[in-house]
Image (cartoon, grey):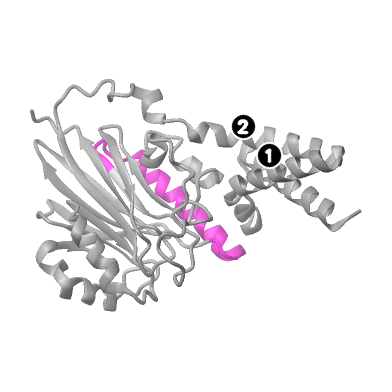
Amino acid sequence: MSIWVLLGVLVCSLSLIATATILARLCTGPVMAVTQLLTPWWALGSIVVGAVAGTSGSYPLALWAVVAVGASSLVIAPKLRHARDHRRGSQGGDRVGTGAVIRVALSNLYLDNEEPDEAIAQLLEIGPDLLVMTELTPELLDRFNAIGGAAHYPHRVHPEPIRGEYEVGIFSREPFVTSGVRTAGELQLVEATRRFGERDLRILAVHPEAPTDRSTFRRWKRQLRQFRAELDDADPLTIALGDLNSGTLQPPYEHLVAGTFRDAHAELGRALKPSWGIATWMPRWVPTFVARLDHLLLGNDVEVLEVEDLDPVGSDHRPFVATLWLDVGVV
């Protein structure tokens, strides 16, 4: 058996394993988590394997590839639909014209960013109403303040002291009603509320640990379960965002959006568009490769109107800005 055939069998088998464990809602270790994270790529590889096997006469392998592609489509196809249109109609359905429109940005600045001024300048130029930054370090915060962040975003909440990597900050143009940092189990939450119209919008920002080994994998799952508990108790006028170190299709992440909260990218049919997986030395126009780890989750009184991905300046994550409609009881 040739190396090509063995490689083809491996790719198709990984596609089937990923699909089967996703459908069974199993995620039992870091290897399985990575396999599930790469599900769209296994499916794409299976398509290539099937095409080459079919044209070269390797019909058993071609059949195996067809099975793998057909199975993976069961979990991939639903993520390509515009969930918002399906849920409420293309014009927002039950939105009756009252509310406020705001812009919210999320950026993983990256601890070792060698272009911090350019990365921060991109965010300041867009000028969202609310800005959430992860991997926040004292050095990055100093650069943010020095090049205009202090003037444009005087209201902020973040852990003190800032220790980097998993630190998160929420920055606002207007004052918060409340703000603070607390822990829920092993999960650190940065939260704030801002008044819009007659109601307060609650903002939750988190950065769970990356599941790189057995120990951190178990902690990651516990943190995501605690995050789900926070969402279950949240007011409908709430947004939750951050680098969740969790990809679309992974069962621990899918559990987050199985309740009342929805993924903003999924609402627009872009749940599988990656936000992580580009080397910092590569040109900014190179697409991100691996998966979406940076998410914005919406309560029932929040609608996403638009999401724009930004350049991954000096970071291995691609930031984004979302335009949201809030049901705040004003005309």
Q: Position of residue 30 (x, y in %)?
A: 62, 58
Asked whether the beta carbons under mark 2 and mark 1 sit within 8 Å of each other, the answer is no
Disc count in the image?
2
Residue beneath the point at 19% across and 59% down: 125
Q: Which quarter of the rendered picture does the C terminus lie within?
A: top left
Range of residues picked out in magenta: 211-238
Real-space CA distance between mark 2 and mark 1, rounded to the nearest whole angstrom: 10 Å
Q: Main secondary structure of the magenta part?
A: helix
Between residues 11 and 174, which one lies in front from this camera angle? 11
- Percent of width and height locating residue 308: 32, 47
Residue 159 visible in the displayed image: no
Nearer the camera: disc 2 or disc 1? 2
Quadrant in the picture for residue 139: bottom left
Vertical arrangement, residue 121 with respect to residue 96, above or below: below
Q: Quarter-wise, where is residue 184 in the image?
A: bottom left
**Would you name the residue on which mark 1 appears?**
20
**Circle 2 sits on which residue?**
74
Disc 2 or 1, which lies upstream in sequence? 1
List x then y, in percent, for residue 126. Answer: 21, 55
What's under tag 1, amino acid-wise?
A: Ala
Residue 160 rendering spot, x and y as whole percentages: 25, 72
For residue 51, the mark is none
Residue 123 figure quarter? bottom left
- Residue extending farthest front: 55
* Left or right of 188, for residue 331: left
83 left or right, relative to 175: right
Is 137 above or below relative to 278?
A: below
Q: Identify which amino acid the numbered label 2 is placed on.
A: Leu
Tell me if mark 2 has few (under 14), some (14-19) or many (20+) residues whose alpha carbon lies within 10 angstroms of its own. Answer: few
Q: Is residue 293 visible in this depiction of the protein? A: yes
User: Which residue lies at the image location 50% right of the left edge and 57% below the top edge?
Assistant: 220
